[in-house]
Amino acid sequence: MSVVAEAYPALVLNADFRPLSYFPLSLWSWQDSIKAVFLERVNIVSEYDVAVHSPSLEMRLPSVISLKEYVNLDRWPAFTRFNVFLRDSFACQYCGGAFPTEDLTFDHVVPRSRGGKTTWTNVITACQDCNLSKGNRLPRECSMHPLRAPIRPTTYQLQQNGRAFPPNYLHESWRDFLYWDSELES
Ligand SMILES: [Zn+2]
């Protein structure tokens, strides 16, 4: 097997030819993709120009594969830090600023010290400055109200948000299956 193949992930589509996930983009290593091909769990939709060889076999690496059986995505995504950022499009919900993930934190709209819970509807993305200046106050006490009321998002809503964040690397064979918002606007 050739070493260069390490860099050839396959885009994984559901049986409806939509990506399993937009952000992070659903990608499998070439090893996992080929295993799934041999287990007949996926169809090859597109291939790289690169092949792997064994003594008895030569096989081009898949660049796009689709699952043979449709996978139902959970309707309700997990309540994680990443998913809160994704719901809020990685923007501070007080000042509206977009920051790199490492400069973002989350804020309890109703502070924990005032009985606020750590839930989808009380936690929002915030920059460090806004988080600090809000402190332990209620929104009405400091006139800092979330730009968008925090909701519990569906997986579909998170997928929609994820489409606004194309990955750094895009193989041309993936483009047909990815409709980034920036391309829709142009
Ligand atoms: Zn802010």
Image (cartoon, rainbow, N blue to C red):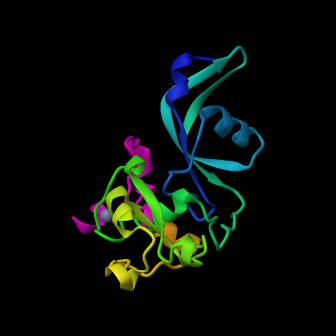
Q: Residue at x 63, y 17 (%)?
A: 1
Q: Is residue 164 magenta?
A: yes
Q: Quadrant of ligand 1?
A: bottom left
Along the horizontal axis of the image, is 9 left or right of 88? Answer: right
Q: Nearer the viewer, residue 133 or 186?
A: 133
Q: Residue furthest left?
A: 186
Q: Is residue 44 left or right of residue 139?
A: right
Q: Is residue 150 above or below residue 49?
A: below
Q: List x then y, in percent, for residue 100.
A: 36, 49
Is residue 128 among the parts visible in the rendering?
yes
**Which residue shows up at 51% across the image and 64% down it?**
84
Residue 81: give x, y in percent of width and height: 54, 58
Q: Quadrant of the C terminus?
A: bottom left
Q: Is residue 129 above or below residue 3?
A: below
Q: Which x, y percent locates residue 9?
A: 54, 37
Closer to the camera in the image, 117 or 16:
117
Q: Nearer the viewer, residue 45 or 125?
A: 125
Q: Is residue 2 magenta?
A: no
Q: Quadrant of residue 57?
A: top right
* Residue closer to the observer: 134 or 158: 134
- Residue 19 in view, yes or no: no
Residue at the spot 57% in from the left edge and 30% down from the top edge: 60
- What segment carries the magenta color? 161-186
Is 116 located above or below residue 44 in the figure?
below
Image coords of residue 82 (percent x, y): 52, 57
